[in-house]
Image (cartoon, rainbow, N blue to C red):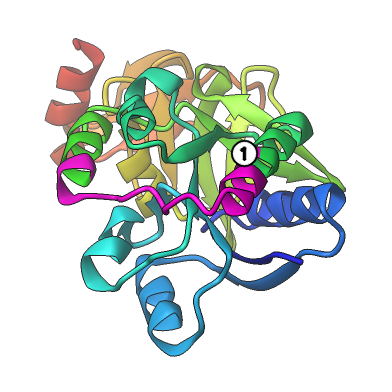
């Protein structure tokens, strides 16, 4: 029976991973599910080491590599990420495994088989060196989130950013609207999303909306040097661009 730790800040993705792990090996014990670098560091300092850890690369308070800089993690690690394979080739050099989101059952099963073989052969845990962390950080700094995993009932759906018209906040929730005008709840704040998406594609127009460059149907000059934006989605309210954002918004349109 393996004792496993999950470090993942997207609740639907964490639950999906937990279900997959138990499906592959029902005897597995999930020790904890954590969502940040800080909580992971604290956990490792206070608990016995797990047999295996799954870590999302980007967490709520930074890259999961920050965990290794603050505490010893001698157990094997499988990284999970939404980034394409070319962005994390450095892992292969050090034999550190990784899974691309959304994680498929067969891929997770293969990772377990690999981990099992390493355990049986008593192979040393691949070293996660400062040089490796620097190389991967350097590559990830130029990458943006390419898809968002959302929960639809008991299912997970992966939505490419190319299919997202805009993000918006409503009451206490954050939502995305797709090109077919469907709305989905996302597990991030607008502030967090603004840090994750490509600023060439998305613009934080105000505290309620982050627009993509394909979401705008029309722009009208409004009173006092402001602008009014009409969105592609039928029935959606027009958005007023305040004077202090007009200049940067025009620059963004011209990118």
- Residue 183 lies, in percent from the top left, at 69, 36
- Residue visible at 19% across and 10% down in the picture: 254
Q: Looking at the image, is 74 positioned above or below residue 244?
A: below
- The residue identified by callout 1 is 114
Q: Is residue 27 left or right of residue 12?
A: right
Q: Is residue 169 left or right of residue 61?
A: right
Of all residues, the one furthest to the front in this rendering is 121
Q: Which of the image's four quarters has the N terminus?
A: bottom right
- Residue visible at 74% across and 45% down in the picture: 151
Residue 118 counted in the magenta span: yes
Identify which residue, 201 or 132, lies in the foreground.
132
- Residue visible at 22% across and 41% down in the picture: 132
Q: Looking at the image, is 217 positioned above or below residue 70?
A: above
Q: Is residue 221 left or right of residue 81?
A: left
Image: magenta residue range = 114-132
Identify which residue, 85 or 233, lies in the foreground.
85
Tell me where residue 178 sits by quadrant: top right
- Residue 44 lies, in percent from the top left, at 42, 78
Q: Which secondary structure, mark 1? A: helix
- Residue 185 lies, in percent from the top left, at 66, 47
Q: Looking at the image, is 75 positioned above or below residue 162?
A: below
Is residue 184 visible to the viewer in this orientation of the structure?
Answer: no
């Amino acid at each position: 029976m393996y004792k496993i730790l999950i470090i993942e800040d997207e609740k639907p993705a964490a639950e999906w991973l937990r279900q997959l792990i138990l499906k592959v090996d029902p005897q597995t014990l999930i020790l904890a599910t954590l969502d940040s670098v800080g909580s992971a560091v604290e956990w490792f300092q206070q608990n016995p080491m797990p047999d295996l850890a799954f870590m999302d690369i980007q967490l709520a308070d930074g890259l999961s590599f920050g965990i290794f800089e603050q505490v010893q993690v001698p157990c094997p690690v499988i990284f999970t990420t939404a980034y394409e394979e070319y962005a994390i080739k450095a892992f292969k050099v050090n034999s550190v495994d990784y899974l691309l989101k959304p994680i498929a059952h067969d891929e997770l099963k293969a990772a377990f088989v690999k981990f099992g073989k390493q355990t049986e052969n008593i192979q040393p845990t691949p070293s996660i060196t400062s040089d490796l962390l620097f190389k991967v950080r350097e590559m990830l700094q130029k990458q943006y989130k390419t898809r968002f995993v959302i929960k639809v009932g008991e299912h997970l759906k992966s939505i490419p950013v190319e299919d997202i018209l805009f993000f918006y906040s409503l009451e206490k929730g954050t939502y995305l609207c797709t090109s077919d005008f469907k709305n989905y709840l996302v597990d991030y704040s607008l502030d967090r999303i603004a840090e994750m998406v490509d600023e060439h594609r998305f613009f934080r127009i105000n505290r309620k909306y982050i627009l993509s460059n394909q979401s705008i149907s029309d722009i009208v000059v409004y009173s006092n040097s402001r602008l009014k934006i009409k969105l592609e989605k039928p029935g959606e309210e027009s958005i007023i661009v305040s004077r202090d954002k007009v200049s940067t918004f025009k620059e963004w349109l011209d990118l």
